[in-house]
Image (cartoon, rainbow, N blue to C red):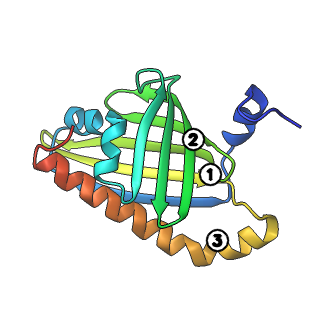
Amino acid sequence: MTEPGGVDDLREAAQPGAGEVTATVIVDAPAEQVFAALLAWERQSDWIPFTRVRVVEGDGREGSRIEAVTALGRATLRDEMLVVRVDEPYEIGVVHHGQLLRGPGVLRCTQLGRARTQVVWHEWFHLPGGRAGRVAWPLLWPGSKIGLTQALKRFARLVEQGRLP
């Protein structure tokens, strides 16, 4: 067994899981501005509903530890992430390594013109609950996709309005 948060645990969490979800949005802003807004971790609270994000360790770039806590009523979900890649202004890679949310994720920016950028948010979560989790995923996936897409639409509006970063 590996120690939670240890090297072997992170290596295991970094492997893609069976729960894959992708969301995409076009932002009317240059890639550098969009990328800076994505790196403003604490500001994710402005565009991800019911969620508070903070940098626990580091400067928000490679090697930093990020915590996102989503609370809806009494239900709370704590997402612990390690930033494993920052390729400015193109890609941010993370590994979710908490007890429930585990797996790699990536935010990619692709410049489409001088003032348009496509953002792709892609996650490969390990599904909890063994076989039951795999069976439940097709029922949960549409909600995950809608949630990520709506968050990215909010993000795009805030960037376009100059309210992010």
Q: What is the crowding at mark 2: few (fewer than 14 residues within 10 Å), some, or many (at least 20)? A: many
Q: Is residue 110 left or right of residue 64?
A: left
Q: Residue furthest left?
A: 161
Q: Which residue is located at x 49 percent, y 49 percent? A: 69
Residue under label 3: 137
Measure the alpha-carbon separation of dots 3 and 1. 14 Å
Closer to the observer: label 3 or label 1? Answer: 1
Q: Which residue is located at x 33 percent, y 64 percent? A: 150
Q: What is the crowding at mark 3: few (fewer than 14 residues within 10 Å), some, or many (at least 20)? A: some
The mark that comes first in sequence, 2 or 3, is 2
Q: Which residue is located at x 50 percent, y 25 percent? A: 64
Residue 12: percent from the left, percent from the top? 75, 39
Q: Secondary structure at mark 1?
A: loop
Residue under label 1: 101
The mark that comes first in sequence, 3 or 1, is 1
Q: Nearer the viewer, residue 92 or 147?
A: 147
Residue 146: percent from the left, percent from the top? 41, 70
Residue under label 2: 80
